Amino acid sequence: MPSIFLSPSTQEFNHFINGGDEEYYMNRIADAMIPYLRASGIEFVRSNPGEPLERVIERSNEYPYDLHLALHSRGTLTGAPTTERGVNVYHFYYSPVNGEKAAYLIAENLKSIYPRSDLVSVVPNLNMIELRYTDAPAVLVELGYDDNLQDALWIENNIPAIGRNLAISVAEFLKVPFVE
């Protein structure tokens, strides 16, 4: 049976401009994915809120998952309100072809629901440890800027749609039928 390790952010210190934090919103999106994953026959394990990233990676590497999916928001270095917007879908630069394939599938599907499809990008990365040190093909999705009001509101107001969209991408990547 296909399986994934679902890793919503544990970064409660990244505050959203409209209230709440990254850990809260990414865990809500993961919660929204779960009924679709179950219905589609996809097994999953997820990280726990507050769990250190090193432990998340250790837990992901304890089993040969078909995909490691990390959910995050994005912010500017200053944390001040910004006009920057967009979604980045990262994969490890030297990952097996499956990490890159999953990133492109996720990005293409997110373009259908993100208000600015031209701002959804796939980005190879060498430095993110959650991509570099997980054994499974890994993708880290930054679903928008938490310090941009439009992106923050988009995330807050579209949690069910984002969760469904990501579950569709996972099912497509794993080549299993998506079930509502």
Image (cartoon, grey):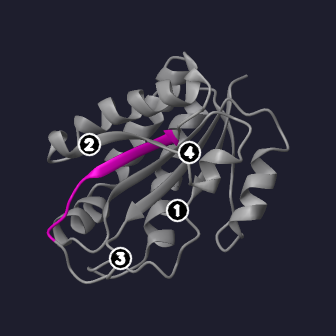
**Circle 2 is placed at which residue position?**
120
Is label 2 or label 4 in front?
Answer: 2
Earlier residue among tags 1 and 4: 1
| Residue 86 shown in magenta | yes
Mark 3 or 2, nearer chain start: 3
Residue span colored magenta = 83-91
The amino acid type of the residue labelled 4 equals Ile
Residue occupied by mark 3:
77
Q: Which mark is residue 27?
A: 1
Please give left or right for residue 84 compared with residue 139 in the image. Answer: left
| Nearer mark to the viewer, of 3 and 1 | 3
Q: Position of residue 141 (x, y in %)?
A: 44, 49
Residue at image x 54%, y 63%?
9
Q: Earlier in the sequence, mark 1 or mark 2?
A: 1
Q: Is residue 24 left or right of residue 147?
A: right
Q: Is residue 29 visible?
A: yes
Measure the C-alpha gap from mark 4 to mark 3.
32 Å
Question: How far across and how far down the image is residue 46, in percent?
Answer: 67, 52
Residue located 45% across and 70% down the image: 22
Nearer to us: label 1 or label 2 = 2
Looking at the picture, how far across and down is residue 123, in whole percent? 39, 41
Left or right, 8 with respect to 107, comes to right
First of labels 3, 1 by sequence position: 1
**Spatial separation of the CA atoms under disc 1 and disc 4:** 11 Å
